[in-house]
């Protein structure tokens, strides 16, 4: 092979699902680059000594972009399942290329995750066909793969909960999805409990968009989902049915303070479990005073992301103050969505000392930033937190 362009073109045509660039020369911006093929594009992780940067590269642009990225490296290894491809530039500038059968090629990240799906892509979920997620024969549409991964990952958290906790079996489980949107997750969770687990549930999805709610209601009726209901309205104004227990509150990308209202309602209703994936935490980014923490006040991406992390840390502490065992966990890999944090909480016997300490930490953080946060404000106005937690 005469040049590195030909080699890169060949490994792409041969379907390389993993490519590693190494042997960084002095002055090279990155010390290593790893690329994984997922859904028709390469997801690149570019490592410096201290940081990792990520980039998506569509297949049509891959040859030129990989050629550009290779500048400053001396070696490429690539795998396509059957072969390992190698290219190395010697100290004298000669290009040495080869291929050999690979018995231990690293597994493609996407392929590993596919095996662990609770809801296999070959299983037809009728409402998801109508909603454009699946084809009639059960194939996930290409433009919905990331969404399919997200709802499967959410199911994994629910499945863990089912295995770890003793959920009541003498009555239907009460589940509320706040900010359900088009209700991909709502239908999947209902399907999971009623079809895959054979459990009775009473489930409600809530959203502001009347046309979306009407569509979801028609689908639920069409498929005989008699205990799945949809409500058009503001999360802030929603009232749970009197006397009906709420076992699980879920949210997937409820935007900005909508997550706070969902968490507040979960506490107010006495929900046993909470699974919440926040989204677009703008509140602190707009209102916080970072004069005491100038390191993070760049007015751009650093401030935005630090504000989001602080917001979710405060939410976690406030849940603890309200008697929940709460923790933040990775939702899905960053290659599929940047909104990859999930707050998992369950009601527990949290010692008063720990609850008070959690509240103090949240309030000290807000005092330092000279701002308020919606979840805390709602809890205070309702008398659910104060000088002494009840």
Image (tube, grey):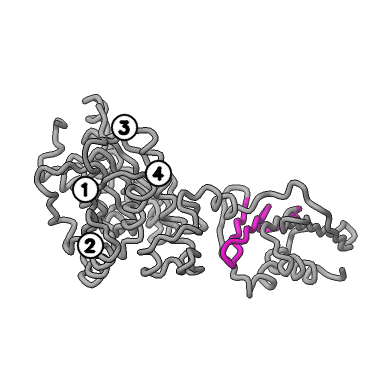
Mark 3 lies on residue: 166
User: Which-is-in-front pick, marks 3 and 4?
Assistant: 3
The residues tagged by marks 1 and 3 sit, at their Cα atoms, a distance apart of 29 Å
Cα distance between the residues tagged 2 and 1: 19 Å
The residue located at (15%, 37%) in the rendering is 385
Q: Position of residue 139 (x, y in %)?
A: 50, 65
In reply to whether residue 360 is colored magenta, the answer given is no
* Observer-nearest of 91 and 193: 193
Q: Secondary structure at mark 2?
A: strand
Q: Which residue is mark 4?
A: 157
Upstream in the sequence, badge 2 or badge 3?
A: 3
Q: CA distance from mark 2 to mark 4?
A: 23 Å
Q: Percent position (x, y) of residue 61?
A: 63, 74
Side (left or right) of 212 relative to 19: left
Query: Seen in the image, is 275 located left or right of residue 16?
Result: left
Q: CA distance from mark 4 to mark 1?
A: 23 Å
Dot 4: what SS? helix
Quadrant for the N terminus, please: bottom right
2 or 1: tag closer to the N-terminus: 2
* Disc 2 target residue: 207
Callout in the foreground (4, 1): 4
């Amino acid at each position: 092979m005469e040049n590195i362009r030909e080699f890169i073109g060949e490994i792409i045509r041969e379907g390389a699902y993993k490519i590693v660039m190494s042997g960084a020369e002095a002055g090279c911006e990155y010390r290593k680059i790893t690329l994984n093929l997922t859904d028709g594009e390469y997801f690149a992780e570019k490592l410096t000594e201290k940081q990792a940067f990520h980039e998506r590269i569509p297949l049509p642009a891959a040859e030129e972009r990989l050629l550009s990225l290779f500048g400053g490296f001396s070696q490429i290894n690539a795998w396509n399942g059957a072969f390992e491809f190698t290219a190395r530039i010697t100290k004298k500038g000669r290009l040495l290329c080869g291929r050999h059968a690979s018995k231990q090629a690293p597994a493609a990240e996407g392929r590993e995750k596919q095996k662990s799906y609770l809801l296999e892509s070959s299983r037809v979920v009728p409402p998801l066909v109508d909603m454009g997620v699946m084809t009639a024969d059960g194939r996930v549409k290409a433009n919905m793969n990331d969404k399919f991964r997200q709802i499967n990952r959410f199911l994994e958290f629910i499945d863990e909960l089912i295995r770890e906790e003793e959920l009541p079996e003498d009555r239907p489980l009460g589940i509320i999805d706040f900010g359900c949107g088009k209700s991909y997750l709502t239908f999947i969770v209902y399907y999971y409990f009623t079809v895959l687990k054979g459990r009775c549930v009473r489930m409600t999805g809530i959203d502001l968009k009347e046309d979306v709610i009407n569509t979801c209601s028609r689908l639920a009726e069409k498929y005989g989902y008699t205990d799945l209901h949809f409500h058009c309205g503001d999360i802030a104004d929603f009232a749970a049915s009197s006397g009906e227990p709420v076992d699980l509150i879920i949210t997937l990308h409820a935007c900005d303070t909508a997550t706070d209202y969902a968490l507040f309602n979960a506490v107010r209703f006495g929900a046993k479990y909470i699974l919440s994936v926040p989204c677009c935490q703008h509140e602190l980014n707009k209102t916080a005073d970072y004069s005491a923490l100038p390191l993070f006040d760049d007015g751009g991406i650093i401030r935005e992301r630090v504000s989001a992390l602080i917001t979710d840390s405060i939410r976690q502490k406030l849940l603890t103050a309200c008697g929940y065992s709460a923790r933040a966990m990775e939702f899905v890999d960053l290659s599929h969505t940047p909104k990859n944090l999930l707050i998992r909480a369950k009601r527990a016997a949290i010692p008063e000392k720990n609850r008070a300490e959690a509240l103090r930490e949240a309030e000290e953080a807000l005092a330092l930033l000279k701002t308020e946060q919606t979840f805390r404000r709602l809890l205070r106005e309702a008398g659910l937190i104060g000088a002494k937690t009840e």
